[in-house]
Amino acid sequence: MKKSALFAPALVAVMALSAYAQQGIQTSADRKETLKVTVSGGFDIDWVFRGKELVAVLGGGFEDEARIESNSNVRFDLDLSSKVSVLLNLAAVRLNGDYSNIGTLGSDGQSVVMWDVAVRMQEVLDNAVTMQVGTQNDFTFDIRGKGSCLFFAPGQAGTFGANTGGSLDYNQVAGVVLWYNRDAAHFAVALLPAIFEGGAASNDEAAYAVTFYYDLDSVGKGSRIGAILAVNALSEAAVGSATSQIITIGGGASLKGLGGMNNLEVFAEFYIQSGDVGTSGDAGGTAFNIGGRFDIEGESAPWVELNITVLSGDDDPLDSDIDQFLSYENVNDFMIVESNLYGINLGTNYRAIKIMGGMSFTAGTGEKNNVTLTGGLGIFTASEDIAAGGSVGNTDKIGTEFDVKLAYWYSRAVSIDVGFAFLSGSEVLEGATAPEDEDSTMLLTIGVGGKF
């Protein structure tokens, strides 16, 4: 079905609900509680130019390629009472498989789907307990609260461990989540039996997790520590056995205002994995991340950040053990190496030193600091050598990437964005593009985004 055929009634519904929301919506006689409807959403439309080397690694031909790619969604939050709400989210999802299947405008490449359907109930048996049943696409373990999760963001990633590069996908996560929030302590239990529904139970992918955060405002406002215990069940199709279960234990901290330096944040995370893979393999992945960010006082709000990340790789791909770090990560600091929207989506088997920074300034007669400029330099090497192919053979040189991004907020709701990335010195890329043997590539994006 074409997008226009689905979006037309959706837009009519949005306008009708918005109008009704101004007047109040009447419920049936046997439901006396007030119904409130909140409509929100957003969109991104990007012109994306990828160098031929990047296109080849992603599975396309060895030619430069430019195309239009987009996300869009309309979300309805319906408060049935002060304690019960329903979430309905209609979305045209940008990522839906490998590179050749990413939805693009102009080719009817996207489908409009009901991406979120959930019921949230507050004060369930106790004033501190909240429960959500249905889709759980927003449930993550995010120490810093920046939307960049090193291990657990199943609704913003592909299948578990499919972060070895070239897999560009989102999961539609379903299950039950219970939250317990009491003062500075925050617990959650997530039962997600349908991250990937493969039909027979042996082909389902599931995750079960317990998370904990504790606020440390006594150290500095916004500081906290956290921990996670997760069990991931892999499908029979993925590893040849229905009994595969990966156990991950991890934790971390984000500490702000140490030593009276209110502009300083120091953060760290670690993860250790064990469990069974297939009929005879063992899991043994590890991950570690440490860094700091300093916000410099001034009207332009400049900031700098240093981040060191180490994700384990597999020292013997031919045996049944899996030593590479497996995750539902959504780290997108660098557009070519890490991004699942634009680049390779590599999220395992690397060591990275990332130096990033940014500033804001005012352009035209718009609001203050309506332009943001950010940039970064990332040095990436493989934890275990990668079989690059061609004349390169095995190598650990993933490359050095330089990114710069400019965003102009035309209004509080609409922005115009430009991004440029260049990856050089990549022997992995050189081997993958044999016999042309190119060790560099580039990416350029120009887009407009909005939210309401």
Image (cartoon, helix red, strand yellow):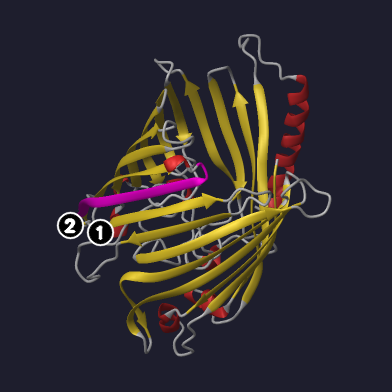
- Residue 147 locus on image (x, y percent): 50, 47
Residue extending furthest front? 260
Which disc number belongs to residue 240?
A: 1
Residue 91 visible somewhere in the drawing? yes
From this view, report whether residue 228 is shown above or below residue 35: below
Secondary structure beneath label 1: loop
Residue under the point 45% across and 30% down: 133
Judge left or right: residue 240 versus residue 45. Answer: left
Q: Main secondary structure of the magenta part?
A: strand
Secondary structure beneath label 2: loop
Tell me which amino acid carries mark 1.
Gly
Query: Which portion, as a residue range, is magenta?
Result: 262-276
Tell me which amino acid carries mark 2.
Thr
Judge left or right: residue 297 versus residue 352. Answer: right
Label 2–label 1 contact, CB within 8 A: yes
Q: Is residue 397 magenta?
A: no
Structural crowding at the residue carrying mark 2, measured as other residues with C-alpha within 10 Å and reported as few (<14), some (14–19) or many (≥20): few
From this view, report whether residue 42 is shown above or below residue 405: above
- Residue 280 locus on image (x, y percent): 15, 59
- Residue 183 locus on image (x, y percent): 42, 23
Q: Which residue is the site of mark 2?
A: 279
Which disc number belongs to residue 130?
A: none
First in residue order: circle 2 vs circle 1: 1
Q: Looking at the rendering, in which quadrant would you find the C terminus?
A: top right
- The quarter of the picture where residue 252 lies is top left
